[in-house]
Image (spheres, rainbow, N blue to C red):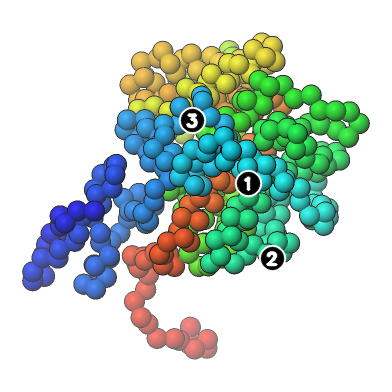
Amino acid sequence: MSDTKATLTIDGREGAIELPIYSGSLGPDVVDVGGLTGQGMFTYDPGFVSTAACESQITYIDGGKGILLHRGYPIDQLAEQSDYLETCYLLLYGELPNAAEKERFVGTVHRHTMVNEQIRTFYNGFRRDAHPMAIMCGVVGALSAFYHDSLDISDEQHRQVAAFRLIAKMPTLAAMSYKFSIGAPFMYPDNSLNYAENFLHMMFGNPCEPSQVSPVLARAMDRIFLLHADHEQNASTSTVRLAGSSGANPFACIAAGIAALWGPSHGGANEAVLEMLEEIGDVSRIDEFVARAKDKDDPFRLMGFGHRVYKNFDPRAKVMKQAADEVLEELGIDSDPLLEIAKRLEEIALSDEYFIEKKLYPNVDFYSGIILKAIGIPTSMFTVIFAVGRTVGWIAHWNEMISGSYRIGRPRQLYTGYAQRDFVPLDKR
């Protein structure tokens, strides 16, 4: 924090308003506008794109430089040298674990992978063709009806148990959502497998034979979880914080985050990539669609290129591209028409001057969509997998807020409706 102040002068008002300026460890300075309310006014910032709603020590993003740090560690270093559960520990506790701490943490997650057997009956209440995200919203919120012993948000132990339960059970619930949609039997977790292996086992295994999980595919899935673990104050994380500011239990808050993530402008981006590839349909039509993308009067947009936050490049994309190449090689896929389109679009985006000038590089959603498609995961499950990975980020932010001082969220508005008017009786209207 600094002692610097900004001075706001408003036409027609006497005297200037002094507003404190705070400096974080990284990033731009922040003007504290909290004092404006006492002056009878407040700021107008649609989308909150210029507003810091909280103080956090978890994740830092510099979109202009393509930087993403978790507790100070660059995302590419974590993706290449760490794994998802180790990154979970880092996000939750602020430091990388030593060997004993990691073993204890992973063991605790393993002990929580099962879900209450009664939860199985919840799935029978959904239609078979229900979107998996709809199921996840309902089932995750319902966890608060089963785990009454971890709902006291003022108790640090309760918060920790809830965190373990959510991180451990999300892959189980996600896989159950998929198995339900295809009429296949649910698979119990196998705690001899690591986090990503276990998820693939529950997704594609069957009770008749032991699961055979490719280490290459498991590593790629682990990277997908890791690269989606947290992304600062995005729409879903802000939703979790806002819900949590009311004192809501953690399961309800994470369900709110899942609902926000479901939107196509947020978590549905990698799903939109596959839908775009299906719309293109054939490699022979790529030039046609690239031309449409360059036409500012055409509503068509290439999905999975460029990023709202990263103005230079997406630091997660390089690692995800490597994982995509490894998966395609492992599976020997060279004739899938959608993947052929994706590879050709990637070549164009990395060499065409228009894309280079506009910084429309392939982003993390583009490559994760390719990986999930190659593994055999249906498009409807893409956002669910995003939610599994992002759960730890939501929990870390929720716990950071609850552990400190916070106020219930209450955004203001610029009212443009009617001024006060008198009621007119029905017979006189």
Q: In the structure shown, which secondary structural element does the residue marked by tag 3 occupy? A: helix
The residue drawn where x is 36% and y is 30% is: 66
Q: What amino acid is labelled 2 in the image?
A: His
User: Quick one: label 2 or label 3, which is nearer the N terminus?
Assistant: 3
Residue shown at 68% from the left, 64% from the top: 149
Lower position in the chain sequence, tag 2 or tag 1: 2
Query: On the rendered structure, is 310 left or right of 142?
Result: left
**Residue 218, quarter of picture:** top right
The secondary element bearing badge 2 is classed as helix
According to the image, label 2 marks what residue? 148
Q: Position of residue 216 (x, y in %)?
A: 66, 20
Callout 2: few (<14), some (14-19), or many (20+) C-alpha neighbours within 10 Å?
A: few
The total of numbered circles placed on residues is 3
Amino acid type of the residue that numbered disc 1 sits on in the rendered structure: Ile
Residue at which label 1 appears: 167
The reply, left or right, for residue 118 in relation to residue 294 is: right
Q: Residue furthest front?
A: 100
Place of residue 138 in the rendered image (x, y in percent of width and height, measured from the top left): 69, 56
Amino acid at pointer 3: Leu
Residue 335 % position (x, y): 68, 12
Among numbered discs 3 and 1, the one appearing first in the sequence: 3
Task: Using the numbered discs, state the Cα–Cα distance from disc 2 to disc 1 in whole angstroms.
Answer: 17 Å
Q: Is residue 264 visible?
A: no
Q: Determine which of the numbered discs, if any, sits on residue 78 in the image.
A: 3
Nearest the eye: 114 or 384 = 114
Residue appearing at x 67%, y 14% in the figure = 330
